[in-house]
Image: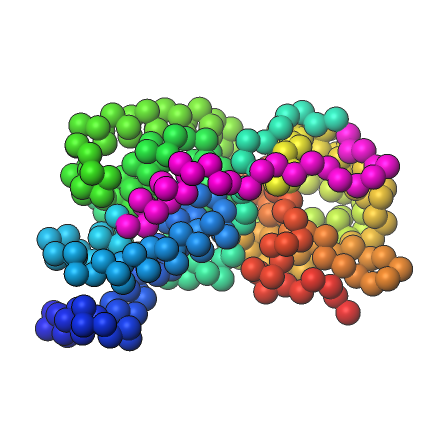
Amino acid sequence: MESARTDLMSRARSGDGEAFRALTEPHRRELQVHCYRMLGSFQDAEDALQDTMLAAWRGLDRFDGRAALRTWLYRIATNRCLDTLRSARRRPAQQWDIPGIEPPEPTGFGETPWLQPYPDALLAGAISVPLGPEARYEQTESISLAFVTALQILPPRQLAVLILRDVLGFHASEVADMLDTTVESVKSALKRARAGLDRRLPMTTDREQPPASDSPAEGAIVAKFVSAYEAADIGALVALLTDDVFMSMPPIPLEYRGRDSVARFCAFIFGAVQRFELVPTRANGQPAFGVYRHTPAGIHGAGLVVLALAGDRIGAMTVFENAVLPVFGLPADLT
């Protein structure tokens, strides 16, 4: 095995693209998820991954083998993501733009308009990789929308340290080497990052745990949600919500917190569109649906909704624009 890997490395350094792909392909999916956690945007993560692979290809002669190839790739990916975060080239908030139709007054405004969902279809093999001994979070928890959203509020260096240490389990010395800093600096940044994350995720600690993915319990809640949404039955939908349910819709920054507030928004939507059709998928380890609206001209994609479940209720709904549908293999229109 080691001799084969040495041969691949020698060939890759000589310009053999197939050898390079053989070396790096086993890490590609997990690196993309890493970039997604750091950037919160599927598109930005794809761009960062491409930059990472290009930089690795061009810099393979500088890989000295002291660290594992996987660690070296994480170093490149992390620093590419930090460059993106520092450049401030993030997607701006989008204003509500339906003339003559005004939504209910929101309870707040989101800080992460660039947030996008991540298809579960691309998670296979990406969140089941062996973790280091320092990892504190389950891999499924650390890809949830609530967790990824909370990460986005952290300063870039703290964000990188927390993911590398608490999500992936790299040692402090490895992280210090990746970021060209000291172990003491890594420990300090991690302490501040943990405190910042705890402030952003208080509500998840008091909630019931969601049912297991694809379990009968999850299926029962999902079926009730689909029935209520497709029938535009506001009463049935509200009965499924927790008291502190939270609804957001990036890139539009409007947020609605609490059952009454979310009910008013859903009633507003159901009043404007009388009939919807939902197509199931999964995002960020959570149930999700392509949302299609019926119109005289056809059935058109309206967006994607991702559910966060809490016990036998819905604790959060995140609604994304229809531009994300192709990423999930969903059509723009239904025939």
Residue depicted at x 59% and y 31%: 110
Residue depicted at x 29% and y 42%: 164
Residue sitting at the far right: 296
Residue depicted at x 12% and y 56%: 64
Q: Is residue 208 left or right of residue 184?
A: right
- Vertical arrangement, residue 41 with respect to residue 124, above or below: above
Judge whether residue 106 can be spotted in this image.
yes
Residue depicted at x 54% and y 47%: 116
Q: Is residue 104 left or right of residue 66?
A: right
Judge whether residue 134 can be spotted in this image.
no
In which quadrant of the rendered image does the N terminus lie?
bottom left
**The magenta segment:** 76-104
x%, y% of residue 250? 61, 40
Quarter residue 154 falls in: top left
Q: Is residue 269 a member of the stretch shown in magenta?
A: no
In which quadrant of the rendered image does the C terminus lie?
bottom right
x%, y% of residue 207? 52, 33
Quarter residue 13 falls in: bottom left
x%, y% of residue 41? 50, 47
Q: Give the color scheme: rainbow, by chain, secondary structure or one colour.
A: rainbow
Q: Is residue 23 left or right of residue 213?
A: left
Count of labels in the image: 0
Q: Is residue 4 left or right of residue 130?
A: left
x%, y% of residue 324? 60, 54
Q: Is residue 102 a member of the stretch shown in magenta?
A: yes
Camera-side residue of 170 and 229: 170
Camera-side residue of 75 and 137: 75
